[in-house]
């Protein structure tokens, strides 16, 4: 596993810590969850574009529904 250090403005870091605390999880777990969600969204977008470029309109529409369910 990789350790990643990031620089954030103090107010943003404080807000993230407060969110993690309110959810009862560590800041590390919160960042993991947020990163996982972003990567899943990007993967769904990529699959949509591939289906669209391949002319598979039914698959592209299913992927749009998937993106919609993710709130994208």
Image: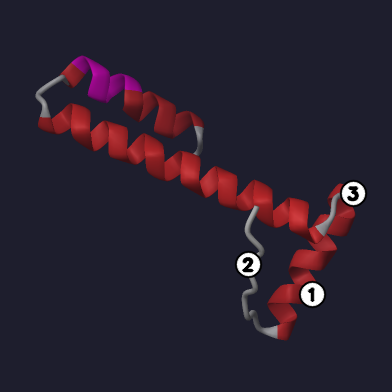
Q: Which mark is residue 14?
A: 1
Q: Earlier in the sequence, mark 1 or mark 2?
A: 2
Give residue 67's position: percent from left, percent from top: 41, 33
Say if mark 1 contacts mark 2, CB within 8 Å: no
Q: Which range is magenta?
A: 58-62
Cα distance between the residues tagged 1 and 3: 15 Å
Judged left or right of residue 37, residue 53 is: left
Instruction: Please say whether residue 8 is one of the residues in the magenta stretch.
Output: no
* Residue at the (62%, 51%) spot, across then down: 34
Q: Earlier in the sequence, mark 3 or mark 2?
A: 2
* Residue at the (30%, 39%) spot, across then down: 46
Q: Earlier in the sequence, mark 1 or mark 3?
A: 1
Residue furthest bottom as drawn:
10
Say if mark 1 contacts mark 3, CB within 8 Å: no
Residue furthest top as drawn:
58
Mark 2 nearby-residue class (10 Å; few <14, some 14–19, many ≥20): few
Q: Which mark is residue 50?
A: none
Total numbered labels placed on residues in the image: 3
**Which residue was labeled with disc 2?**
4
**Which residue was labeled with disc 3?**
24
Hey, which quadrant is residue 37 in on the image?
A: top right
Colouring method of the image: secondary structure
- Label 2 sits on a secondary structure element that is loop
Judged left or right of residue 47, residue 4 is: right
Q: Is residue 57 above or below residue 41?
A: above
Between residues 13 and 3, which one lies in front from this camera angle?
Answer: 3
């Amino acid at each position: 596993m990789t350790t990643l250090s990031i620089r954030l403005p103090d107010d943003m870091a404080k807000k993230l810590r407060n969110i993690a605390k309110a959810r009862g999880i560590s800041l590390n777990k919160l960042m993991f969850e947020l990163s996982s969600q972003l990567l899943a969204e990007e993967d769904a977008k990529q699959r949509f574009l591939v289906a669209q470029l391949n002319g598979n309109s039914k698959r592209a529409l299913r992927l749009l529904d998937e993106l919609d369910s993710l709130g994208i």
